[in-house]
């Protein structure tokens, strides 16, 4: 089959029937942690979805109490715990997942594809992407035609910066099962390679393939994100609202809050974010809430949110979940700049993708090491991703280096891509760009 991902053949989408079977979103894991990392976190579900997963956990626990030698049951329980950790931001589920998956492998050490798959998903969730790749390859040897295994590998390769591996795994996933999970991964691949139209087309196909309300909401959210990231607030709001007509999903509410903030309706946005962080305290929401409080002239309240985020990161690390990328970006803007650089360098030592390159460049910049930062911005922008935050970071680095023409070019690019890319940084970009243009 001709490759869906080849740039000269984006219309290959028509080769997959819309009636393809659709699996649940429990297998859509780390790529959307990656997808949203500069903005945040993976999609969190609605209360109904969380209740279903908890019900499944209860049923599995009951079954395993009766049949403690059920290796498959232990693998399923471990995978359910991984999903609960993702959607609740409760890191204690990681240890429970580890224990259940270890039990499954102890009972059935050979040819245990479900447990190997669960281990890969757990490693991705903990941001141990090297281990996720290793577990994924072990699972692939047992289940060579598993779309879910290819999904784990696609996520791991993406985060490790292995573009060839990510493309191959995503293509294989599409070939095996062209559904919501595979089309959304393809969309991310397209977006990060500067192919926004193809990314949107892939999400349209994901939406057409979606059956369950959760899947429809998932697709609507990322269609809204594509629109927001290109500065189209009306389209973004339409997509978020369309998703909310199907199900009350926290990510869609976050999308609406983000649009309200971009339009200057801080009262509405602050109220929405306050509810979000109380119900679903994901790091992305806490950071965005803190920055919005700061922009609204409430720095003391903002500082409280940043401290909550710092404590949350410590709890995650205690449970084996390392996210030096998010921590570095937060510290670079709101904390210990030297620690931000240390974290970014540590993350670069583990994975060398465009997100980490950007974070390392920014950490070097805030520490006054702009000449060293610029090569990392080259790496960050190498794929052609039209990312407003990347362009802003590069513009500010050029400005610090005394290169006004390049600074003006990239600050203008950031604002042209999305004038609302950050409540913190967009106003700075506008001010610096105006100064540069007035000083000609």
Image (cartoon, rainbow, N blue to C red):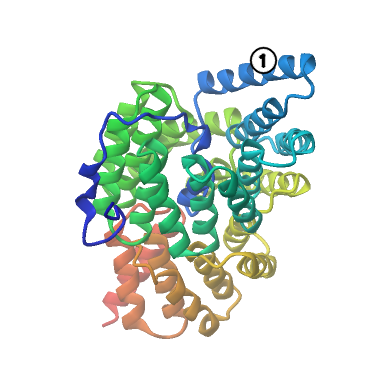
Expressed as whole percent of the image width and height from the top left, the position of residue 13 reads 24, 45
Using the rendered image of the protein, determine whether residue 40 is visible from the camera's viewpoint. Answer: no
Expressed as whole percent of the image width and height from the top left, the position of residue 6 reads 28, 60
Expressed as whole percent of the image width and height from the top left, the position of residue 337 reads 65, 67
Left or right: where 76 falls relative to 404: right
Q: Is residue 91 above or below residue 23?
A: below
Q: Nearer the viewer, residue 293 or 132?
A: 132
Expressed as whole percent of the image width and height from the top left, the position of residue 121 reads 60, 43
Q: Residue at x 52, y 36 (%)?
A: 27
Using the rendered image of the protein, determine whether residue 222 is visible from the camera's viewpoint. Answer: yes
Which quadrant would residue 80 be assigned to in this image? Answer: top right
Q: Residue at x 45, y 69 (%)?
A: 380
Q: Is residue 77 above or below residue 436?
A: above
Q: Is residue 344 above or below residue 80?
A: below
Q: Nearer the viewer, residue 367 or 303?
A: 367
Count of numbered tags: 1
Callout 1: few (<14), some (14-19), or many (20+) C-alpha neighbours within 10 Å? few
Q: Is residue 53 above or below residue 200?
A: above
Which quadrant would the C terminus be assigned to in this image? Answer: bottom left
Which residue corresponds to mark 1?
59
Q: Residue at x 47, y 80 (%)?
A: 374
> Secondary structure under badge 1?
helix
Which quadrant would residue 205 be assigned to in this image? Answer: top left
């Amino acid at each position: 089959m001709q490759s869906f991902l080849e740039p000269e053949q984006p219309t290959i989408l028509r080769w997959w029937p819309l009636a393809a079977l659709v699996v649940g979103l429990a297998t859509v894991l780390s790529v959307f942690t990656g997808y949203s990392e500069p903005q945040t976190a993976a999609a969190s579900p609605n209360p109904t979805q969380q209740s279903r997963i908890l019900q499944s956990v209860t049923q599995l626990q009951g079954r395993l109490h009766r049949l403690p030698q059920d290796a498959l049951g232990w693998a399923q329980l471990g995978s359910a715990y991984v999903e609960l950790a993702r959607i609740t931001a409760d890191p204690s589920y990681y240890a429970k997942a580890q224990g259940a998956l270890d039990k499954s492998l102890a009972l059935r050490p050979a040819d245990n594809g479900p447990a190997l798959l669960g281990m890969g998903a757990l490693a991705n969730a903990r941001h141990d992407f090297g281990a996720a790749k290793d577990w994924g390859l072990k699972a692939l040897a047992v289940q060579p035609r598993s779309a879910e295994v290819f999904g784990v590998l696609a996520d791991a390769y993406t985060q490790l910066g292995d573009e060839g591996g990510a493309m191959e795994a995503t293509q294989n996933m599409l070939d095996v099962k062209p559904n919501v999970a595979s089309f959304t991964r393809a969309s991310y691949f397209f977006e990060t390679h500067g192919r926004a139209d193809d990314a949107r087309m892939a999400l349209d196909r994901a939406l057409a393939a979606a059956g369950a309300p959760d899947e429809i909401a998932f697709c609507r959210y990322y269609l809204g994100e594509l629109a927001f990231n290109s500065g189209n607030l009306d389209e973004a709001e339409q997509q978020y609202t369309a998703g909310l007509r199907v199900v009350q999903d926290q990510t869609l509410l976050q999308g609406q809050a983000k649009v309200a903030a971009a339009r200057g309706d801080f009262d509405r946005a602050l109220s929405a974010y306050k509810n979000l962080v109380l119900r679903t305290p994901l790091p992305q929401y806490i950071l965005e809430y803190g920055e919005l409080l700061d922009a609204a002239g409430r720095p003391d309240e903002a500082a409280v949110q940043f401290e909550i985020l710092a404590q949350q990161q410590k709890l995650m690390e205690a449970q084996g979940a390392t996210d030096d990328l998010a921590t570095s970006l937060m510290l670079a803007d709101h904390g210990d700049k030297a620690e931000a650089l240390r974290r970014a360098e540590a993350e670069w030592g583990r994975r060398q993708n465009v997100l980490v390159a950007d974070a390392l460049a920014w950490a070097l910049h805030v520490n006054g090491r702009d000449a060293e930062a610029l090569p990392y911005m080259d790496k960050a922008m190498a794929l052609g991703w039209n990312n407003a935050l990347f362009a802003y970071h590069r513009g500010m680095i050029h400005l610090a280096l005394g290169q006004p023409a390049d600074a003006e070019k990239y600050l203008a690019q950031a604002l042209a891509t999305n004038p609302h890319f950050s409540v913190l940084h967009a106003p700075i970009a506008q001010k610096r760009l105006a100064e540069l243009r007035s000083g000609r």
